[in-house]
Amino acid sequence: MILEVRGLQKSFGGLMAVKDMGLHLDQGEILAVIGPNGAGKTTLLNLLSGLFLPDAGQITLAGHDITRATPERRCHLGIGRAFQVVRPFLEMTVFENVMVGAMFGKHGVSKAEAWKHTEQVLHLTGLEQHAHKNAHDLTLMQDKRLEVARALATRPSVLLLDEVMAGLRPNEAQDAVQLVKSVRDSGVSVLFIEHVMPVVRDLADRVVVMEYGSKLAEGTYQSVVRDPRVVAAYLGEEGA
Ligand SMILES: Nc1ncnc2c1ncn2[C@@H]1O[C@H](COP(=O)(O)OP(=O)(O)OP(=O)(O)O)[C@@H](O)[C@H]1O
């Protein structure tokens, strides 16, 4: 087990966004976190990456308690994150964007090592031929690839993906599925939030369903989509 969450809790004013939440991510696993709007998925990711601190509960990464660590510390310890809204350094090239992460993601990396790692990440993410383009000249799919590449530049052991497929056409989403599988095959465990169900079906080894800040169900894609509690949670959303 690479990542474990126990009894996690986070309120905003009177609203309990995450409530007694628990989950684990195994080494080399791709785990989907799904759930209706407002279920607490993004808040969970923010707690994992250190953007928010929880009111209660514990997060461990490879056995280390990171519950109250800063985002920078978590990055150094091996948590990488890619966002739905991509924010590369627009005036820099693709190569430079990845190089920044490779230089600063871990302590004591030489420029030569960072350069080599950048080349490897660009190869893995299919951006080699675009390495010298400016970041503002990329297509949406290339933007997503760069977002994943920037997260990988910091050499994470766990990659958190926040709806990275949003806005992609179905054939592009399939390319993105292949990209995430290649990332896993390179030794990175992946936890992703996703609303596009075919992507969840094709990508996830296991699915955790959240509702009202807590875990409602977990299992294979086929088992959770047939779970009457999960069906009811999603139908409730449509009826709202
Ligand atoms: N910074 C914040 N301040 C106040 N309330 C917040 C904040 N972040 C989230 N919330 C509230 O917490 C609840 C959970 O939100 P969250 O964004 O985590 O859900 P989600 O499952 O990611 O939803 P979606 O699928 O729509 O992105 C919502 O009711 C939301 O309005």
Image (cartoon, helix red, strand yellow):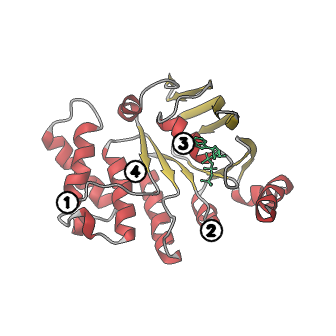
Q: Amino acid at mark 1?
A: Thr
Residue found at x 54% / y 27%: 60
State which mark lies toward you, 2 or 3. 3
Q: Which corner quadrant holds the N terminus?
A: top right
- Looking at the image, do the residues carrying marks 2 and 3 touch, with CB atoms under 8 Å apart? no
Q: Residue at x 58, y 58 (%)?
A: 194
Quarter of the image where the C terminus is located: bottom right
Q: Is disc 3 placed on a helix, strand or loop?
A: helix
What residue is at 77 percent from the left and 56 percent from the top? 223
Cα distance in 3D space between marks 2 and 4: 23 Å
Alpha-carbon distance for marks 3 and 4?
Answer: 22 Å
Q: Amino acid at mark 4?
A: Ser
Residue type indicated by callout 2:
Pro
Task: Give residue 121's mark.
Answer: none
Q: Earlier in the sequence, mark 2 or mark 1?
A: 1
Label 2 residue SS: helix
SS for dot 4: loop
Q: Residues within 10 Å of mark 2 (few under 14, many from 20)?
A: some
Residue at the disc numbered 4: 186
Quarter of the image for residue 87 reads bottom left
Q: Residue furthest right?
A: 228
**Residue closer to the observer: 54 or 230:** 54
**Badge 1 element:** loop
Q: Is residue 164 left or right of residue 115?
A: right
For mark 2, what is the residue? 198
Q: Decide which of tag 3 and tag 1 comes sooner along the chain.
A: 3
Instruction: Please provide percent x and percent y for residue 126.
Output: 32, 65
Q: Earlier in the sequence, mark 1 or mark 4?
A: 1
Examine the image and state in which quarter residue 4 appears. Answer: top right
Label 3 vs label 4, nearer the camera? 3
State the separation of the CA atoms marked 3 and 1.
28 Å
**Residue 178 % position (x, y):** 46, 65
